[in-house]
Image (cartoon, helix red, strand yellow):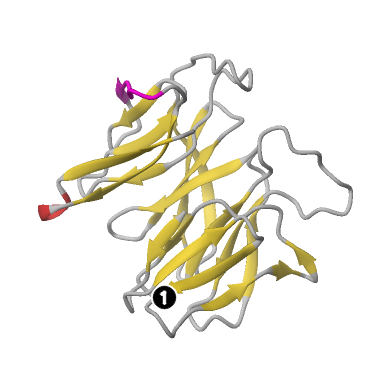
Amino acid sequence: GLTVDSKGRIIAAQYTKKISVIYPKGSEKTLTSSYNGKPYIRPNDLIADKKGGIYFTDPYQVGATRKPEDLLQAIYYISPDGQKVTQLITDINRPNGITLSADGKTLFANDWDGPYLLTYDVQPDGSLKNRKNFGKYTLKQETDHGLVSGADGLCVSASGHAFATTPAGVQIFSPKGEHLADLEAPYDMPPQNCGFGGPGYGYLYVTGRG
């Protein structure tokens, strides 16, 4: 996952177990690589808020072996000053795609091993409350992993429509969480992530897996 913060820096969730600034040149640095002395599992996706804080997900890869000493799968928050990392949410089966609403008041999170796109209310200190099942994914088998639901990447339009990349394609939800459509993707495997760009952020871009 990639995000751009209020300073224009590009920040990446890296499979090398860290969250890092990777651009602009000369500003590269690791923001966090461990929590309470333990390395992360496999940081997956992230989003910067308007204050400069960063939310990121840390799930197991599909098929990975879990170890007793591993951290819990979780959503974390890096404080705007970069001095504190807080483990916020640990009750998602496999937290994956993550993003914020345009006003920054709602955090959206995909569950790769669950039937629902989830939302949380963002608090002034960056913490999250009031978990809600925002929308239910269309069920569809993914033969490589035997999954029948769940979602990977995630983005939300300015109008509040949510777009989730899933085994059924890019699933679209209304601002009220109603499932509107599945955009089937022309890939051998399910689409992996999505985001808006172009003039007026009017174009949806989708990355393919494999």
Q: Residue at x 64, y 68 (%)?
A: 86
Can residue 107 be found in the magenta stretch?
Answer: no
Q: Residue 23 or 129: which is nearer the viewer? A: 23
Which amino acid type corresponds to the residue marked 1 in the rendered image? Gly
Q: Residue at x 74, y 38 (%)?
A: 64
Can residue 180 be found in the magenta stretch?
Answer: yes
Image position, residue 7 (x, y; %)? 33, 79
According to the picture, the residue beneath numbered tag 1 turns out to be 52
Residue sitting farthest toward the right: 68
Image position, residue 26 (x, y; %)? 43, 85
Image position, residue 43 (x, y; %)? 60, 55
Badge 1 marks a residue whose secondary structure is loop
* Residue 125 at least partly seen: no
* Crowd tier of the residue under label 1, counting other residues whose Cα lies within 10 Å: few below 14, some 14–19, many 20 or above: some
Relative vertical location of residue 126 with respect to residue 184 in this rendering, above or below: below
Q: Residue 92 or 71: which is nearer the viewer? A: 71
Q: Is residue 37 left or right of residue 9?
A: right
Residue 2: name its quadrant: bottom left
Q: Residue 75 or 165: which is nearer the viewer? A: 165
Magenta range is 179-187
Relative vertical location of residue 168 with respect to residue 35 in this rendering, above or below: above
